[in-house]
């Protein structure tokens, strides 16, 4: 079958690669894609927001399945538009995508259905938000209610930092309409992990878990980013906790969305934290995490095309996962996530590509190579029997190159080696 992937980042490159290696898939298209994907898919220069153009392309090319990668078109109703045109698109409809599009919607849903999460309150004015912060103290978490490209969360370790975040988001409209209201949450302490599931018509196929590193610099220092690296499995999270999270978070959330009249189809991403009282939800997303998708999908051994067909037909399917470990490191442009410098030449990637997987996110072709064209530029992964082996491999390959005007964390996976002896 022919498949169309919507999006242009590293997550979409991972989805493209997964479809490309599936024997059931004849051809993969990506719109708008990026030039680093040209060896894995046919690039279609249509913006992810141009629904009519994308629909016309899918009809004219006989696309059997469209897989929507990013959150923005999902929250704008791309799946609704495709379905109205009689086309199959994988992802939540607009009303179900609210689980990511509105933090307040997600928190209210969890409260109503007793899904474990942090205590919270929602504010659209600065003064009552500041009063709440002073009443509850720090550390405390401030979240823009709407989409903010993974940057709308401040984990404030002091009251002053929390108040500054509120004034910036609500008062200065830091993220436009997305921060016209904020959710202020209790700070939860514990080990974080990402638990994603394929969902359709009440069926849930849980994936293997991953852990990503959000802070820009080594030792989890610096500002929050979209993610600087990830790995799977996560040995410090026992299977019993994953099973508990499935029963107390994933299943009840899917059932709750059905009960609310907003049934969920797509990737349900549960960002979880293992507290002393068990796993709790930090956030939900309505799509694959990035960079978690790049490490988790590599562990999938089943034919992705056959699986997607079975899922959407509500047919049984045994989804198989590798026991091997995958660890990935993001190469980012200098200045990310604040002021990104674009246009700098990347080193020759051919030596790395011979052994490891490279996922292009913010790159642009330049002669026979690439230049940086975004904040997170590449993600490079290695596979090993153990995480430490995967970590050693990937850093060995990266450290052999010169990354002038780029940077990367040198400690992806450190929490595992700190916790598991």
Image (cartoon, grey):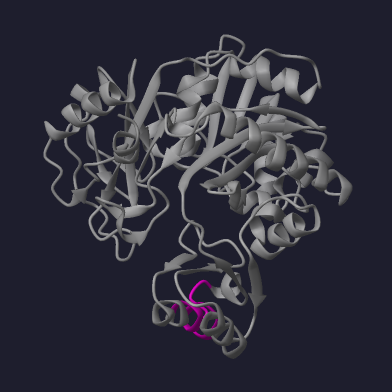
**Residue 361: percent from left, percent from top:** 39, 42
Magenta part of the chain? 165-175
Magenta span includes 308:
no
Residue pictured at 67% horizontal, 18% vertical: 307
In this image, 373 relative to 46: left or right? Answer: left
Nearer to us in this view, 164 or 139: 139
Task: Name the side, left or right, on which 240 lies relative to 406.
Answer: right
Asked whether residue 382 appears in the rendered view, the answer is: yes
| Residue found at the very far top of the displayed protein | 23
Is residue 42 visible in the rendered structure shown here?
no
State how many labels appear.
0
Quadrant in which the N terminus is drawn: top right
Q: Position of residue 245 (x, y in %)?
A: 64, 38
| Chief secondary structure of the magenta portion | helix
Does 63 sit above or below residue 361? above
Left or right: residue 64 compared with residue 196: right
- Dividing the image into 4 quarters, which one contains the C terminus? top left
Task: Report the front residue among 155 and 103.
Answer: 155
- x%, y% of residue 252? 77, 42
Instruction: Name above or below for residue 6 compared with residue 226.
Output: above
* Residue that appears at 40% across and 29% down: 38
Residue at the image position 40 percent from the left and 82 percent from the top: 160
Q: Where 338 sits versus 133, above or below?
A: above
The residue located at (54%, 85%) in the rendering is: 130
**Where does residue 158 sit, x and y in percent of width and height?**
39, 76
Magenta-span inclusion, residue 166: yes
Front one among 24 and 146: 146
Quarter of the image where one finds residue 250: top right
In the current view of this chain or complex, which residue is farthest to the bottom?
A: 127
- Which image quarter: residue 117? bottom right
Q: Nearer the viewer, residue 347 or 296?
A: 296
């Amino acid at each position: 079958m022919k498949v169309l992937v919507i999006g242009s980042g590293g997550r979409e490159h991972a989805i493209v690669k997964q479809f490309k290696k599936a024997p059931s898939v004849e051809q993969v298209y990506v719109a708008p894609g990026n030039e680093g994907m040209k060896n894995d898919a046919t690039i279609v220069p249509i913006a992810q927001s141009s629904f009519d153009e994308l629909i016309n392309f899918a009809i004219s090319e006989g696309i059997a399945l469209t897989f929507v990668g990013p959150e923005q078109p999902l929250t704008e109703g791309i799946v609704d538009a495709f379905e109205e045109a009689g086309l199959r698109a994988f992802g939540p409809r607009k009303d179900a995508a609210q689980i990511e599009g509105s933090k307040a919607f997600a928190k209210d849903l969890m409260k109503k259905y007793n899904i474990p999460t942090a205590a919270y309150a929602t504010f659209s004015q600065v003064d009552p938000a500041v009063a709440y912060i002073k009443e509850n103290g720090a550390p405390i978490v401030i979240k823009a209610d709407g989409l903010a490209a993974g940057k709308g969360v401040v984990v404030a370790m002091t009251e002053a930092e929390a108040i500054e975040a509120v004034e910036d988001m609500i008062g200065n409209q830091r993220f436009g309409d997305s921060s016209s209201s904020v959710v202020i949450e209790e700070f939860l302490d514990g080990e974080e992990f990402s638990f994603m599931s394929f969902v359709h018509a009440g069926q849930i196929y849980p994936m293997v878990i991953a852990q990503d590193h959000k802070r820009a610099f080594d030792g989890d220092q610096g500002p929050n980013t979209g993610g600087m690296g990830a790995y799977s499995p996560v040995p410090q999270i026992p299977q019993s906790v994953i099973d508990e999270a499935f029963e107390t978070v994933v299943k009840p959330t899917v059932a709750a969305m059905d009960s609310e009249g907003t049934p969920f189809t797509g990737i349900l991403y549960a960002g979880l934290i293992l507290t002393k009282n068990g796993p709790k939800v930090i956030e939900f997303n309505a799509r694959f995490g990035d960079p978690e998708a790049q490490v988790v999908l590599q562990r999938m051994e089943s034919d992705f095309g056959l699986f997607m067909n079975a899922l959407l037909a509500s047919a049984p399917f045994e989804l198989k996962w590798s026991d091997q470990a995958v660890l990935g490191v993001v190469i980012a442009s200098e200045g990310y996530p604040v002021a990104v410098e674009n246009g700098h030449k990347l080193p020759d990637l051919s030596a790395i590509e011979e052994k490891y997987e490279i996922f292009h996110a913010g790159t642009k072709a330049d002669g026979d190579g690439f230049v940086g064209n975004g904040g997170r530029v590449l993600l490079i992964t290695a596979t090993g029997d153990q995480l430490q082996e995967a970590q050693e491999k990937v850093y060995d390959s990266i450290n052999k190159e010169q990354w002038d005007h780029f940077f990367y964390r040198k400690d992806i996976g450190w929490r595992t080696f700190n916790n598991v002896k």
